[in-house]
Amino acid sequence: MALRHKYVLVVLFLYRLLWGFFLYRFVDSLVSPILARFPDDHPDPNALRLFLIEAQFRLLKTDIAHETLWLLAGLFLIRMAITPLVNAGLYYSFYHSDEAQGTRVLSGIRRRWKPVALLYALENVLLLLPAVWIAPMAKALFFADPSLQDWLRAMLPYLLAWAAWGFAVHLASQFMQFGAASGRGILQGLLRAFRVALPLCGVSLAIIGLGAAASLVVTTAALLWTGFFAVALHQGFQLVRSLIALWTSASQYELWKPESAG
């Protein structure tokens, strides 16, 4: 199913490539000036402490970060607008893959983008919902505990629980989007997700594990051979990431497909 949508893979690769390029340039424009001012421990060992105090003052007492935060929010909203369109077209094409020789991604975007976009927005709201409780708690613990390691150790169970919640919400939303894109109903997709929960989690975690292993290999190689090679390697790896993402969606769809066929 994934290989049948080869041109979608190319589009995803170009999308990730351009996104990575602009994000790289954005981060570089922020980090390079900071590194140029980063102090040396010699001859004054207190220079780094003064640098951090100045940085904290500028971040908390001035509006220096406002432009950056607004730009990041804009990039996030653009990505949130594009992702459900891709999902609607791809899932619709999966459902109609047996009816035609080609793919029907563009038809799916035109016909099913509204319900898929609503589900995607609901998914993101549910993903961010625990932050309403975790963020104030993390702030209180951070100022109460002088040790950064102790703070991270105290926050780790909550972060793991948040990650598990996000994983479950994403899988449920994925199956609901399958139902919406196929026209068979959102509730049908949600019920199917509960029925095949174990194989769904197993397939998803297995492919995610393969992707994480590949990312680890690429990151290790980039650390060993820094410079232009590292940048080119990371950008070229976007093709593998796109293939893994497409493969994951196709595998999850195959678990939903028997219910749709019935």
Image: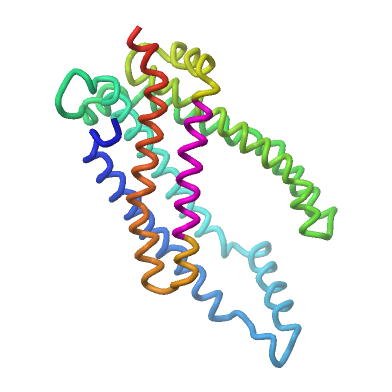
Q: Residue at x 38, y 42 (%)?
A: 244
Closest to the observer: 82 or 103?
Answer: 103
Task: Please name the predominant secondary structure of the magenta segment in the image.
Answer: helix
Q: Is residue 217 magenta?
A: yes
Which quadrant is home to the N terminus? top left
In this rendering, would 253 be left or right of 41? left
Name the residue rendered at 29%, 25% in the picture. Answer: 94
Display coloring: rainbow
Residue 62 image position (x, y, % from top left): 63, 65
- Residue at position x 22%, y 19% in the image: 98
| Horizontal arrangement in the rendering, residue 113 relative to residue 106 (left or right) | right
The outermost residue toward the left is 101
Query: What residue appears at the point 49 percent right and 53 percent down from the top-left corner?
Result: 70
Say which of 222 and 228 sits in front.
Answer: 222
Q: Quadrant location of the C terminus?
A: top left
Report the side of 185 relative to 169 (left or right): left
Q: Residue furthest top?
A: 262
Where is 231 relative to 20, above or below?
Answer: below
* Front-most of residues 105 and 228: 228
Does residue 253 sit above or below 131 in this rendering? above
Quarter where residue 225 is shown = bottom left
Residue 77: horizontal and vertical position, in percent? 43, 43
Q: Position of residue 227 (x, y in %)?
A: 41, 74
Magenta stretch: includes residue 9: no
Residues drawn in magenta: 200-218
Q: Residue furthest bottom?
A: 43
Instruction: Give the total of numbered labels.
Output: 0
